[in-house]
Image (tube, rainbow, N blue to C red):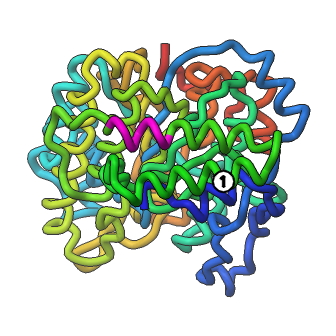
Amino acid sequence: MPLNLRTTLGNLLPAAKPAAAPNPPSAAAASVAPAAAASVAPAAAPAAARTAAAAAPANDHTLVVVFQRFAADWINMLVPYGDPDYAVLRPNLKVTNPVVLDGFFGLNPGLNALKPLYDAGRLGFVTATGWIPLDSRDRSHFYAQTLAEAGARAGVTGGWLGRAMLRTPATENVWNAIAAENSIPASLQGYPGAIAVRDFADLDHGSTMGIAVTALIEAVAELAGPPGDTTRRLAQGMRALTETPPPAPTAAYPGTALGNGLRVAAQAIRAGMSPRVVTVNSEDDWDTHVVQASRHAVSLPNFANALVAFHTDLGNLMDKVTVVTMTEFGRKARENFGGTDHGTASSMLVMGGGVLGGRVHGRWPGLSPQALFQNEDLEPTTDFRAVLAEILVKRLGVNLADIEQVFPGGYAGQGNWRNFLL
């Protein structure tokens, strides 16, 4: 199938009420995964949100959100070799030959392919990111992913990116929000126009299947009547895609979840589909409780090479694209027997046009016993939502006044961004 039709048609037909973000579990229940929010159909756009979106300044940037699922160890990626406690906490896993960035941080050699982009000012990092205030119960993968994609700990429906899209300047483009993966992630729930595209090659251009899919969507539009205009535009877009395939990649992508997702994102942008947001799933062996060194020897080059291929593939189009990575939590500062367990703070990578790259943004809290959260975790000094809020306002045209609706209840450092974007 070219699109996830169950999700796509569910988004375009009358929707059920989306699930609310779960309330924090008791400590004893913290390891129990909540019901998957991504399976719930999103709600229609509130009128107030549409009004606010119409007032926001229009722009033509694309935001690509990469989710490193199952907790990437950024201490082993963005290496704090200048911290004297680093080698003490990681006697066996410490990186002894980092690619020097600024005299304190260095890249794991497996990420060396990113260094030219860093030196060119096209790529940077925000260190020590996470939830503020902290909650030690956030160390369950699925619970933490649900919270991160909701953008709030409790009392919200849909995802942070879905709420943000409802507050962007109005457009008739049916490709506004693309999930370059098998299904629409929880972060995009609440935005009716989100479409999941695993691979444009699945359209089988000009085939009987491609034509049948388009005809099916057109039939749904007719049944829906006047409100089916969005569905009709989708059918028109589908017909165009079945007749003319998106451009072939001009760079070699790794055959990983991240590589495949970024390839689809680049094809959509190069084909002139003008998505405002694209989500990409990077479920690429990040849960490294054991044998981390040998696993990172594979996953880190794949991660770097996928990002470099995407930047190369887009060429000058990258000037209007911003990539941000996130993960549900970091990993413990102290190594275990060959790996790292679930922790707290992590780091975020930002790449693209107008990024103040070539530097590591944020405040490093230190790895001393006094600085660690519960004597075992890197403590966050930048709320991850502050990073996302800066991108939403500066790149997607979300009004600053609407950010509290995107991240209900606000976030630490609200109005005091790290200013990593021009």
Q: Position of residue 251 (x, y in %)?
A: 16, 36
Q: Residue at x 53, y 20 (%)?
A: 419
Q: Is residue 411 above or below residue 343?
A: above
Horizontal side of residue 246 vs 81, given as left or right: right
Horizontal side of residue 401 vs 63, given as left or right: right
Q: Residue at x 35, y 44 (%)?
A: 264
| Residue range corresponding to the magenta coloring | 238-244
Horizontal side of residue 264 vs 176, given as left or right: left
**Which residue lies most toward the left here?**
97
Q: Position of residue 405 (x, y in %)?
A: 80, 38
> Which residue is the site of mark 1?
219
- Quick check: can you spot residue 67? no
Q: Residue at x 43, y 62 (%)?
A: 1
Q: Is residue 233 above or below residue 370?
A: above
Horizontal side of residue 37 vs 234, given as left or right: right
Total labels: the figure holds: 1
Q: Amino acid at mark 1?
A: Ala
Q: Could you say which is closer to the camera, residue 62 or residue 138?
A: 62
